Image (spheres, grey):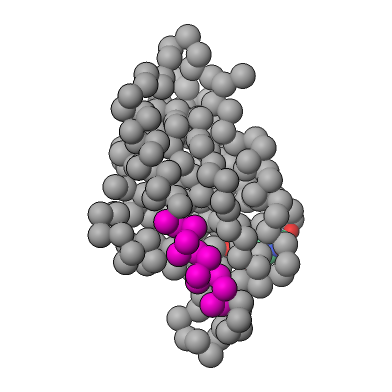
Amino acid sequence: MKITIVSGSHRAPSQSEKVARYLESVITKENDNVEVYFYNLANNPLPLWDQSIWESDQTWIDRLAPIKEELASSDAFIFVVPEWHGMVPSGFKNFLLMFNRFELGHKPALITSVSSGIGGTYPVTELRMNSSKNNRLCYIPESLIIRNVEQVLNEDPKDNTEEEDSYYRGRISWCLDILVGYADALKAMREKITVHHDDYSNGM
Ligand SMILES: Cc1cc2nc3c(=O)[nH]c(=O)nc-3n(C[C@H](O)[C@H](O)[C@H](O)COP(=O)(O)O)c2cc1C
């Protein structure tokens, strides 16, 4: 099973990347059959979407082809997104513009939102509300909100607030089990049903 993890912060380094790497370590340690494709939006590797993407521009084809291949062969996604001014960073929304139902459709996705304070709700609601109409991503009911992120999930226990850190570690492990369960279940569903229909290429 392949799981793509996207670290959605433009910053390098970022707390989102720290959390994303932690999730990668847990999901691979706890599942022998899981391999991870890690895509990092630090320093904006993708230019902003432009019209030439729809005009078969060769530079865009070459840029996106290797990523499309990784996403298309993935069974599930984990999006780690910071809350920036109460929003998902624009680079992550740009990422979502690049890929469609053939890469993402009818596959489970776990939203993991990150805040240095007590925020983190907005990215979850934003993604659930308006980021899956055409690509048919299936956000699972569980999501993670890592608050006070600088004090948790650090390698050195001295940098962590013990109670919060152990709560998050336990909850992350359980939540990733749920994601893997959905990945298995929806793979079977996609194999059974013709999920892509040319007459209904976009959602309503
Ligand atoms: C441009 C910008 C805007 C931010 N706005 C918010 C916010 O609205 N709510 C919040 O909880 N944290 C906000 N933060 C702080 C982030 O939660 C913090 O930087 C955290 O480490 C996650 O971002 P990172 O993955 O880029 O490190 C903001 C940070 C930046 C750089």
Task: Tell me: residue 185, above or below residue 19.
Answer: above
Of residues 36 and 88, which is closer to you in this image? 36
Residue 22 pos. (x, y %): 44, 68
In this image, 58 relative to 54: left or right?
A: left
Q: Residue at x 33, y 64 (%)?
A: 30
Of residues 82 and 105, which is closer to you in this image? 105
What predominant SS class does the magenta segment belong to? helix
Of residues 26 and 72, which is closer to you in this image? 26
Of residues 145 and 92, which is closer to you in this image? 145
Q: In the image as oriented, which residue stretches furthest toward the left? A: 32
Q: Which residues are magenta?
A: 165-177
In this image, 165 relative to 55: left or right?
A: right
The quadrant where residue 125 appears = top right
Q: Residue at x 61, y 77 (%)?
A: 164
Task: Tell me: residue 55, above or below residue 107.
Answer: above
As for residue 169 lying within the magenta part, the answer is yes
Q: Residue at x 29, y 47 (%)?
A: 1
Q: Quadrant of ligand 1?
A: bottom right
As for residue 124 lying within the magenta part, the answer is no
Q: Residue at x 74, y 53 (%)?
A: 86
Residue 104 pos. (x, y %): 44, 35
In this image, 168 relative to 105: left or right?
A: right
